[in-house]
Image (cartoon, grey):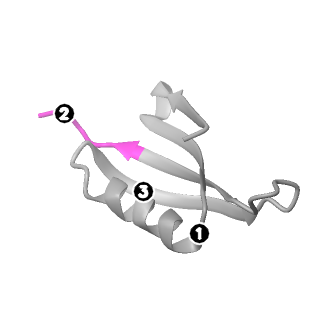
Amino acid sequence: MLALDPDPEHQLLRLTAEAATSEAMLDYVVNLKQQTVFSAISMKRHQLDAVDPNNVLRFSVTLSLAERR
């Protein structure tokens, strides 16, 4: 994870992360979807970082916080 930016007004978190492979990126998102604290998860963008010698995938995800009961 590179950054976690809260948006309390809209009850959102914006997460930016890197992964070595597309499978690792998707596994990360699937694991987030299994967390009950989030009501919705949406991948906003992903791109290969060609400047990085490891060719990592950088991606952004928006997480909607579930309502507290």
The secondary structure that most of the magenta stretch takes on is loop
**Range of the magenta residues?**
64-69
> Which label lies toward us, 3 or 1?
1
Judge left or right: residue 66 versus residue 59: left
Q: Position of residue 46 (x, y in %)?
A: 67, 63
**Mark 2 or mark 1: whose residue is earlier in sequence:** 1
Q: Position of residue 59 (x, y in %)?
A: 63, 56
Disc 1 target residue: 21
Q: Residue at x 43, y 59 (%)?
A: 28
- Which residue, as the protein is rendered here, is positioned at the far front? 53
> Badge 3 local density, few (<14 within 10 Å), some, or many (20+)?
some
Q: Is 60 in the magenta?
A: no
Q: Residue at x 42, y 56 (%)?
A: 41
Could you tell me which quadrant the C terminus lies in?
Answer: top left
> Badge 2 local density, few (<14 within 10 Å), some, or many (20+)?
few
Circles 3 and 2 in contact, beta carbons < 8 Å: no
Q: Is 67 in the magenta?
A: yes
Mark 1: which secondary structure? loop
**Mark 3 or mark 2: whose residue is earlier in sequence:** 3
